[in-house]
Amino acid sequence: MDNKRVAELKESLRAFKNDIDPKLVAKLDLEKCKRIIDRLTGFSIECEICGAYFTKLENHLLQLFERNEAIDQQTVKAHNQFIGEIETHLTEEHDLITSGYYTSIYMSLGMGIGLLFGLVVFDNIGFGLPIGLAIGVAIGAGKDADAKKKGKTI
């Protein structure tokens, strides 16, 4: 992958991000696009699919930059679907996770166990729920931090 192409794409993305409405930046999740560019660049050496996705993403973003202010809801939806497709490839083929993945899973598990714990021990569901929630969030946040430190997040 040509480093010049990657640098130009990132610079165009940064300029586009500064030129458009902050609400649209949030809808398009351009920060995630930057992280995906980095990941695709890293994996494109050993994975042909990542190289192809990088080229498609580059063309997609250049078309998006040209539209600038004429971005409608349908364009945002198509963009997010395309980013989701790339994200799916990265998670399935390269064992990466999205930010907050473990926190959401362990929070749900903690709430479920907390409900049972509150019902059995305290005879009141309401006491176990916040305890399970807190424990689940703590464990999930720890696992997310560990995954980020190991470079396993998108």
Image: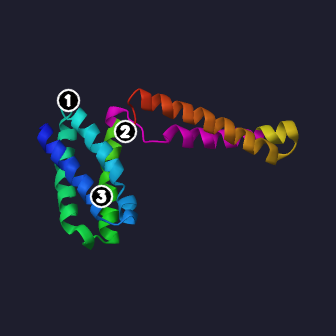
As for residue 70 lying within the magenta part, the answer is no
- Residue under numbered circle 1: 46
> Going by the image, does 109 lie left or right of 53?
right
* Residue 84 makes an appearance in the image: no
Label placed on residue 17: 3
Nearer to the camera, 54 or 14:
14
Q: Which mark is residue 91?
A: 2
Whether residue 149 sits left or right of residue 3 in the image: it is: right
- Which residue is found at the position 85% from the left and 45% from the top? 124
Callout 3 amino acid? Lys
Of residue 125 and residue 145, the one placed in the foreground of this image is: 145
C-alpha separation, residue under disc 3 versus residue under disc 2: 26 Å
* Region rendered in magenta: 93-116
- Point 35% across, 70% down: residue: 73
Labels 3 and 2 touching (C-beta < 8 A): no
Residue at image position (16%, 47%) is 8
